[in-house]
Amino acid sequence: MNNHIFTAFSDPNRRRMLDILKHGKRTAGDLSSSFDISGSAVSQHLKVLLQARLVGVEKRKNSRIYYLRKEGFEDLQQYLGQFWDDHLTVLKQLAEAEEREKEQ
C-alpha cells in the first residue's frame, strides 16, 4: 500500500482536485482557475497526488494533462476492504453466537 495516499487525501484542496478530475482530464492551468491559491501551490498539490499514484500526467506539446489513475483508487479500495471484511467476519461470529444462545 502506498502511504502517500493518506497524505494526498488529508488536504481539502487535493480532494477537490480529485473531484474535478473525476469529470475528465485537465491541465494545471484549468485546475488553477478553480482555486484561490497560486499556480505554484496547485503544482505542489499535483505533485503529492502524483506521488500517491492517484493522478497521472500526459505530456502534450507544451501542456501537461492530468487525469485520475484507476489503479491508485483500486489500491485504496483493496486496503480499506480488508477492514470491511474483518468487520463482517466479526459481525457473523456475533450473530452466530447470539443464535446459539437463543437455541439453548
Image (spheres, helix red, strand yellow):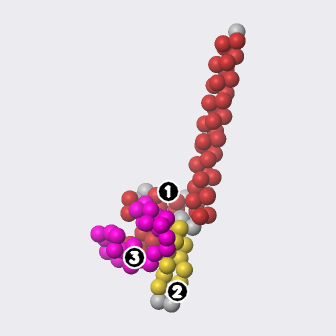
**Mark 2 closeness class: few <14, some 14–19, many ≥20 residues within 10 Å:** few
* Residue closest to the far top: 104
User: Residue, x 54% and y 80% (percent of image)?
Assistant: 58
Q: What is the magenta range? A: 15-41
- Residue shown at 70% from the left, 16% from the top: 100
Q: Disc 3, disc 1: CB below 8 Å?
A: no
| Residue at left offset 38%, top offset 59% | 12
The answer to whether 71 is drawn above or below residue 61 in the figure is above
Residue 30: which numbered mark, if any?
3
Q: Which residue is mark 1?
A: 6
Q: Is residue 50 something one can see in this rendering?
A: no
* Residue 39 left/right relative to 64: left
Would you name the residue on which mark 2 appears? 60
Name which residue type carries label 1.
Phe
Q: Quadrant of the C terminus?
A: top right
- For the N terminus, give its image quadrant: bottom right
Query: How much space separates mark 3 and mark 1, taking CA atoms?
Result: 25 Å
Is 35 inside the magenta-drawn segment? yes
Q: What's under tag 2, amino acid-wise?
A: Arg
Residue 57 image point, x, y percent: 53, 76
Q: Is residue 25 left or right of residue 38?
A: right
Of discs 1 and 2, which sits in the foreground?
2
